[in-house]
Image (cartoon, grey):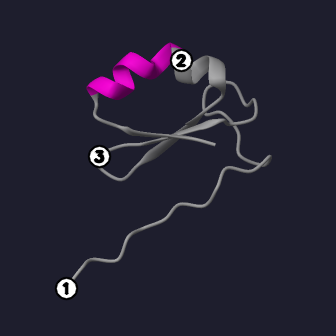
């Protein structure tokens, strides 16, 4: 038996960067299930730390 896959909705114009409020282009899903939304600038600025945390990075 397989487990159902959780799917997250696509990013929309209403999704905003958690750092600056610009349009979100990236969703980082953390191992504990939390998520962070980033504009392109902040996604690049925090990319190394997100990889270190083994976050799943979804680009929208």
**Residue placed under numbered mark 2 in the picture:** 44
Q: Residue at x 46, y 19 (%)?
A: 46
Residue 15 appears left or right of 42: right
Toward the front, the furthest residue is: 1
Task: Residue 29: give x, y in percent of width and height.
Answer: 42, 45
Q: Nearer the viewer, mark 1 or mark 2?
A: 1
Residue that carries the numbered disc 3 in the rendered image? 31
Q: Position of residue 35 (x, y in %)?
A: 46, 45
Q: Is residue 33 magenta?
A: no
Task: Say if 40 sits above or below 56 in the image.
Answer: above
State the CA–CA distance, disc 1 to disc 3: 23 Å
- Residue placed at 34% from the left, 77% from the top? 4
The earlier-in-sequence mark between 2 and 3 is 3
Q: Quadrant of the N terminus?
A: bottom left
SS of the residue under disc 1? loop
Q: From the viewer's perspective, is residue 16 above or below residue 19? A: below
User: Which secondary structure class fits the magenta region best?
Assistant: helix
22 and 10: which one is in front?
10
What residue would you read off at disc 1? Answer: 1
Outermost residue, top direction?
45
Q: Which residues are magenta?
A: 45-52
Q: Identify the residue at image location x=74%, y=51%.
A: 12
């Amino acid at each position: 038996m397989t487990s159902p896959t959780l799917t997250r909705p696509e990013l929309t114009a209403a999704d905003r960067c958690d750092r600056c409020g610009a349009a979100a282009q990236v969703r980082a899903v953390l191992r504990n299930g939390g998520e962070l939304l980033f504009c392109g600038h902040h996604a690049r600025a925090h990319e190394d730390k997100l990889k270190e945390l083994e976050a799943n990075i979804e680009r929208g």
